[in-house]
Amino acid sequence: MEHILSLSYGKDSLACLGAIEKLGWPLGRIVHAEVWATDTIPADLPPMVEFKAKADKIIKERYGIEVEHVRGQKSYDDCFYMICGENGRAAKNKCVGGIYGWPFQRGPWCNSRLKQSVLAKLPKNSVQYVGIAADEPGRFHVFSDKKKSPLVEAGWDEAKCRKWCEENDLLSPIYTTATRGGCWFCHNQGVEQLRLLRKNYPDLWALMLKWDSDSPVSFHADGHTVHDFDERFALEDQGIVSADEPWKWSYLDEVQLKWR
């Protein structure tokens, strides 16, 4: 029976390496579900891409296991432009003949199609280790004979996981120099992350705007689009509004009326 660590490169999943070692549990494989924005553009920003390469090298040297980067046949872009059918989400949302577009904030297709579907292909008789910390009881319901958390068994909470990563040079930049982890195009990210993406990675922001123009679903559930955020940030660039002040979407209408 194979024992496989599902690695996200967050502090908890990386700390599983230390907990597994402490517990003396077997570990045969380490698997990371890699997501790509397009066939040539990764879903991670450059600092995270660099960190993954660094972490892989450290893991190989210390544990003798090469991290397997697995990905599905389709990229985010492929799924974004997938034609809706009569079943599932399409039937519920009357999207017959259209494209999926942005994922919904609840039950997003990106998680199931780009990550879960890949990990579901792991051997059925294997034991999967997941990075759920001891102080996350709300997530314990996923455990079974085939899915276990070394962190819970070792009693490691999130603070302990971070400390272990710091001591082993495996703390991701998302906890230090970067603002968040995950996909740079995520519809759940906050305003600050979107602002930094637009400022630091204009090519990626341009792709977000293209997707936004093509999507039949709004970027945020409240109806606001990437283009709305783009206009907001443009007003900040011009000094018309301040990023430090409370924002109201009505400001966009007020500015448009003023310049008509």
Image: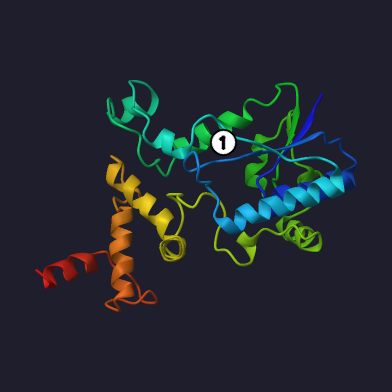
Residue placed under numbered mark 1 in the picture: 115
Residue depicted at x 64% and y 61%: 173
Quadrant housing the C terminus: bottom left
Left or right for 201, reference 93: right
Q: Nearer the viewer, residue 71 or 85?
A: 71
Outermost residue to the front: 40
Label 1 crowd bin: few (<14), some (14–19), many (20+), radius 10 Å: some
Kindly indicate the quadrant of the structure image that contains residue 89. top left
Image: 56 above or below 159: above
Image: 1 above or below 159: above
**x and y, in percent, of residue 195 in the image:** 41, 64
Residue depicted at x 72% and y 30%: 144
Left or right for 236, reference 129: left
**x and y, in percent, of residue 222 in the image:** 31, 51
Left or right for 50, reference 58: left
Q: Nearer the viewer, residue 77 or 158?
A: 77
